[in-house]
Image (spheres, rainbow, N blue to C red):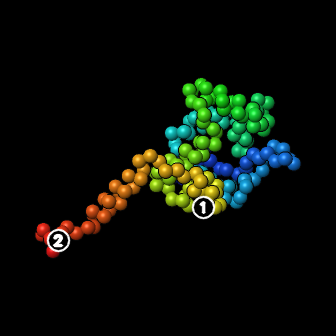
Amino acid sequence: MTSTWGGPYRLVRRACAKTPTDGLTVKAPKSAAGVRTVAFPASLAEELANHLAEYADAGRTGLVFVGARGGVLRRNDFRRIWLRALAATGLDDVHFHDLRHTGNTLAATGGASTRELMHRMGHSSVRVALIYQHLVNGRDHVIADYVDGQIRKVKRPPHGPSGT
C-alpha cells in the first residue's frame, strides 16, 4: 500500500493470540492503540510484497504468516521456520520479538518522540513504550554534542581576559 505522502504503509487491524480457554485465535489487538496505520521503510516494500505474495493469505484481510496448509500458524511451527531463517543468515540467539525492539530503537535514534513510538508500536501507555527504547552505544555522546552545539549558537563570547 502507498500513503498520500508516497511511502508504503500497512494497516494493523487484527492480532493472533493464544489463550488457555480459546486456543489460538485471531482477534482485535489488546488495546484501541493497537489498531493503527503504520508507515514503514520504503527499502523494505519489495521484500514485504514478495513475502505477502508467497507466504501470506491473499487479500486485505489475509494473515501475514500462515501455516503450510494456509491456516493460522502455530507458535511451534513458526519457531521452526524462524530458526531455519536464522541458520540461513548465520544469525543465532535472535528472537522474533527482537525485531520490535530493534525497529523501535532505530525510530527513537532517528528522532521519533515517545508519542510517535507509542503509535508505531500500538501502545496505549508510556510505561510500555519505554520498555522498547534502549540506550544505544555512543548515543549519549551524540546527544551531548548536539546540546553543546545549540548552547554555542547562543552563548556570548567573554569580553577580555576576565570575561568583562
Q: Is residue 110 above or below residue 88?
A: below
The residue tagged 2 is 163
- In the image, what residue type sits under mark 1? Val
Q: Nearer the viewer, residue 33 or 146?
A: 146
Q: Position of residue 16 (x, y in %)?
A: 75, 45
Instruction: Residue at 64%, 39% (x, y): give it.
Output: 96
156 sits left or right of 68 in the view: left
Q: Position of residue 87 (x, y in %)?
A: 61, 26
The image quarter in which residue 149 lies: bottom left
Q: Position of residue 89 (x, y in %)?
A: 56, 27
Q: Is residue 3 above or below residue 46?
A: below
The image quarter in which residue 150 lies: bottom left
Determine which of the numbered discs, if any, sits on residue 126 in the image.
1
Which comes before the other along the chain, label 1 or label 2?
A: 1
Specify few, some or many for label 1: CA neighbours under 10 Å numbering under 14, 14-19, or 20 or more: few
For mark 1, give the secondary structure: helix
Q: Nearer the viewer, residue 58 or 156?
A: 156
- Can residue 119 be seen here? The reply is no
Instruction: Residue at 65%, 50% (x, y): give it.
Output: 11
CA gap, disc 1 to disc 2?
Answer: 45 Å
- In the image, what residue type sits under mark 2? Gly
The image quarter in which residue 156 lies: bottom left
Q: Quadrant of the C terminus?
A: bottom left
